[in-house]
Amino acid sequence: MILGCHVNFGIEQLLGCAKQATEYGANTFMFYTGAPQNTIRKPLDQNLILEAKTYMKEHQMDLSHVICHAPYIINLANKKDKNKWEFSIQFLKNEIDRCESMGITNIVLHPGSAVGLTHEEGIQNIIEALNFVLRKDQTCNILLETMAGKGTECGCNLEEIKQILDQVGKEHVGVCIDTCHLNDAGYSLKNFDSFLQQLDELIGLDSLKCVHLNDSKNECGTHKDRHENIGFGTIGFDVLLSILNHPKLKEVPFILETPYVGNNKEDKTRIYPPYRFEIMSLKNQTLNQNLYEDIVSFYKKD
């Protein structure tokens, strides 16, 4: 299995990401090139990129499986303020350039939210923006993420993703599915084979380049987008494990984006990453019922 998680792009940049993933027992990872909520971006260090590539080879990590995530501040669906829309386009271009300089071949993008426009207007704005962004010589694919349908989000079902792809093309655009988002959008993942068949018929399985593997705090179809730790939500461990091990998805990277946890809900500063333990559970194919206690105990002793 190709299994990783979200890691931090810190002082050591791509090298630090790879080291962190290794510590978690992952063989791939996903990162933002800076904070997802702002536009501050530090210059890339080419020496660290070279060191990262060497480190990854030594630890059997395939760079082509590594995923970048575009920041949340990019909203291609809303053109009410044209300056902001054009800024989103340029910022996405810059993020793609940063990916390509590191050799990253896939960047996940939330399609956007219409906010004050009709849903159809939002989708058409996404199509127009992507056609501005895409270059014929591009080496980094844009992966449109399936959304939960919260608020005015676009891309919350396969038909909308297909509509965008049909008017943009698939040469440099693919799909990332998120299990929490699919559940919250109304897709029953207990019938995952049926979902995959629908995806194949509408879009093509060859366009599926990444899976965000998350449990959900919500019942199916609630359109809320609240991630839960693997096996502790409404989707459940067995369903998520079967998706991870699906024979048609052997070459697809799976990325965990589950919540950090702690033993004090009031103290948000003392929460810890769950990935080491969730990855271990998935590899062992056994749910760790003591997940929260084990995480807190492990990090407190450090």
Image (cartoon, grey):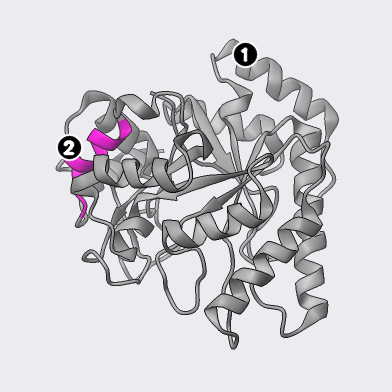
Q: Residues within 10 Å of mark 2 (few under 14, many from 20)?
A: some
* Chain part drawn in magenta: 235-244
Residue 231: image location, x then y, percent: 21, 46
Determine the residue positioned at 59% across, 52% down.
Answer: 165
Determine the residue positioned at 60% across, 11% down.
Answer: 58
Q: Closest to the observer: 292 or 168?
A: 168
Q: Secondary structure at mark 2?
A: loop
Whether residue 242 is situated above or below residue 92 in the rendered picture: above
Residue 294: image location, x then y, percent: 25, 40
Q: Closest to the observer: 17 or 2?
A: 2
Residue tagged 1:
57
Whether residue 276 is situated above or below residue 149 in the rendered picture: above
At label 1, which amino acid type do we have?
A: Lys
**Splitting the image into 4 quarters, where does residue 299 fall?**
top left
**Is residue 76 among what the camera can see?**
no
Q: Residue furthest bottom?
A: 116
Judge left or right: residue 98 versus residue 170: right
Q: Residues within 10 Å of mark 1 (few under 14, many from 20)?
A: few
At label 2, which amino acid type do we have?
A: Leu
Q: Closest to the observer: 300 or 64?
A: 64
Quadrant where the image shows the C terminus: top left
Q: Earlier in the sequence, mark 1 or mark 2?
A: 1
Separation (CA) of disc 1 from disc 2? 31 Å
Magenta stretch contains residue 252: no
Determine the residue positioned at 69% across, 24% down.
Answer: 52
Quadrant where the image shows the N terminus: top left
Residue tagged 2:
287
Whether residue 301 is situated above or below residue 169 in the rendered picture: above
